[in-house]
Amino acid sequence: MNIANLKLLAVIALACLSTACAVREGSTKVFADYDSGTRFDTYRTFAWESANPLVVATNGVVDPRLQPSLMKETAAQLSSKGLREVKSKLDADLLVAFTIGSTDTLQENNFPGSVQPIGTVGQSYRESSEIREVTTGLLSVDMFNRTNRSRVWTGWAATGLTIDVRLNQQEEVKSIITLIMEQFPPAT
């Protein structure tokens, strides 16, 4: 399976994940999966899957500063784990890529009501609810064995996007990449 097909598979998995996970606004859920037959202790170097390793699986505008931020924070995390970045893919043990997307869902919040008198003989209980649109952002970090092009590890996060997240993108990228990369390498 080539990398393009693996990216498509990752996008589909993220879409399925987004419908399976209820993510509250402002919260982040992190997951990881890996090839259990992989010896992660043998990997020493990494490179980016391409010059532009970010695949966007959503309609809409993506801030052009996002890809460099993802690359910078991921490189820092991998370096802190003992891997060295190399310029040429041919010299790398691992190739790294990203996928982002988002989904919009409706979220209903019910609030307890109050007892209201009706005339002189009865009472009514009123409950209120609020329905609002919530955008869930999805980010996947994928690592491929350069030699056989197989995906060996994927970490992903789903987070409720708020205006604060959008305004503080650099801080959020660092935070989310840190959470994802806590799962790498997997405890085997």
Image (tube, rainbow, N blue to C red):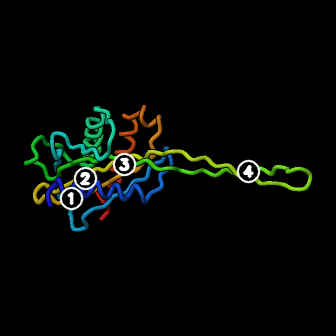
View extreme (left): residue: 90
Q: Are marks 4 and 1 in contact (CB under 8 Å)?
A: no
Comes first in the chain, label 1 or label 3: 3
Q: Label 2: which residue?
A: 142
Q: Determine the residue positioned at 39% across, 42% down.
A: 175
Comes first in the chain, label 1 or label 2: 2
Q: Nearer the viewer, mark 1 or mark 3?
A: 3
Q: How much space separates mark 4 and mark 2, taking CA atoms? A: 47 Å
Comes first in the chain, label 4 or label 2: 4
Q: Are marks 4 and 2 in contact (CB under 8 Å)?
A: no
* Residue type indicated by callout 4: Gly
Quick one: label 3, few (<14), some, or many (20+) residues within 10 Å?
A: many
* x then y, percent, for residue 32: 33, 58
Q: Label 4: which residue?
A: 113
| Label ID, residue 138 | 3
Q: How much space separates mark 4 and mark 3, taking CA atoms? A: 35 Å
Q: Nearer the viewer, mark 4 or mark 3?
A: 4
Residue 178 in view of the camera: no
Q: Are marks 4 and 3 in contact (CB under 8 Å)?
A: no
